[in-house]
Image: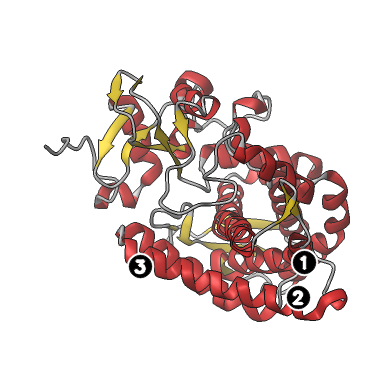
Amino acid sequence: MNTPQDWDPRAPEVLADPIAAYDRMRRRCPVAHSDYLHHSVFRHADVMRILLDHETFSSQASRHVSVPNSMDPPEHTAYRRLIEPYFAPERMAAFEPACRRLCAELVAALPRNERVEIMFGLAHPFALRMQCAFLGWPDSLHEPLRQWIHKKNVATLSGDAHAIAAVATEFDETIRALLKVRRDAGDQAPDDATTRLLRETVNGRPLAEDEIVSILRNWTVGELGTMASSVGIIAHYLASHPDLQDRLRSQPELVRPANDEILRIHAPLIANRRATTCPVRLGGTQIPAGERVTLIWASANRDEAVFGDPDEFRLDRDPSLNLLYGAGIHACPGAPLARLEIEAMIQALLAGTRALEPVAEQPPMPAIYPASGYRQAMLQLRHD
């Protein structure tokens, strides 16, 4: 017998204003069933419980192995130990000059004193160029990767398993070609993150190619969509809050915590998932073993029980409560890189303009799930 649906995540009114829809669900039905997302979890406390109890809520919630995202301890532990050094402070310090140079170039290329569609004019090029720079990939991949992210989002929204598999295969073939180039180059291969993965070992053996492809797929999926969304969200928020914009121009050291707070208010990543390993009661709802559970970050980070008025911008909040980069053993290992890149981009944008202003007659168009933020967002740039 089919379980009754508590909501429809793909309903037009939800897709038109996802954040408001999640706010309503958090208050009305904090653990809600749907055929598309199964059991969606909206409250901060329930999401934290899931994140910290990996024995009851397994990360093995997909038909496909994802390294290390879909792994549980002890398997997850070895791969996580391998990945974390790629985002260590010394690696971030080495990458920072190139990161800031790219941001300055992108801002300098924007038209002066004109309206700019910020997503395709800045946010997407930023995410693509940064990802390729960090991984050592050629600029020729910018457009194929942009198209791939679009196709992935369309396939995910459709729920078509065949389409999702085809998009994944297309990406994997691109990565395998990059790996072949490096293997063929031998000692002459560039010393970048992609080449270093070819030399890694786990549990006393070399990483298999499928594992390397999975790691690079996870880094790319996690970077391109959410990084572009983050820049669009923050730029539009600052344009709509000129006092904060002016404060950050005069105090650029506040940009990083301000970014985290703005992205708490408007999440760049909507959801993640787990699977129950045993029957469990969550938020007043009994969930059987083997059920998929969807963690709605975009709701949990706005929970009034934790944050009061979820739309109030505050720099004095406890950063450990912000689930922007998750929590527990699966907290995003790439958070140091993401924070560096977004900080560099927003600081460059503020330094390179006198003012950012919204365009009232062209309000932003929300992104379509599973993306967040905006499909399009028009801003007026002031330089003089």
Marks 3 and 1, how far apart in space?
A: 30 Å
Residue 273 pos. (x, y %): 44, 41
Image x and y of residue 241, in percent: 59, 44
Please identify the quadrant where the N terminus is shown.
Answer: top left
Instruction: Report the amino acid beneath label 2.
Output: Arg
**In the drawing, what numbered circle is on residue 182?**
2
Q: Which mark is residue 195?
A: 1
From the top left corner, tell me how far across and down residue 201 is, in percent: 75, 53
* Badge 1 amino acid: Thr
The residue carrying mark 3 is 163
- Amino acid type of disc 3? Ala
Q: Residue at x 58, y 55 (%)?
A: 218
Give x and y (percent) for residue 303. Answer: 46, 26
State the image quarter where residue 57 is shown.
top left
**In the rendered structure, are the residues bearing label 2 and label 1 in contact, judged by CB atoms less than 8 Å apart?**
yes
Question: Is 61 positioned to the left or the right of 136 in the image?
Answer: left
- Report which quarter residue 381 is drawn in: bottom right
Left-right relation of 364 to 321: left
Q: In this orientation, which residue lies closer to the viewer: 72 or 92?
A: 72
Q: Is residue 9 above or below residue 169?
A: above
Give the spatial CA distance, label 2 vs label 3.
Answer: 30 Å
Considering only order in the chain, which callout, 1 or 2, is on the residue closer to the N terminus? 2
Query: Residue farthest to the front?
Result: 204
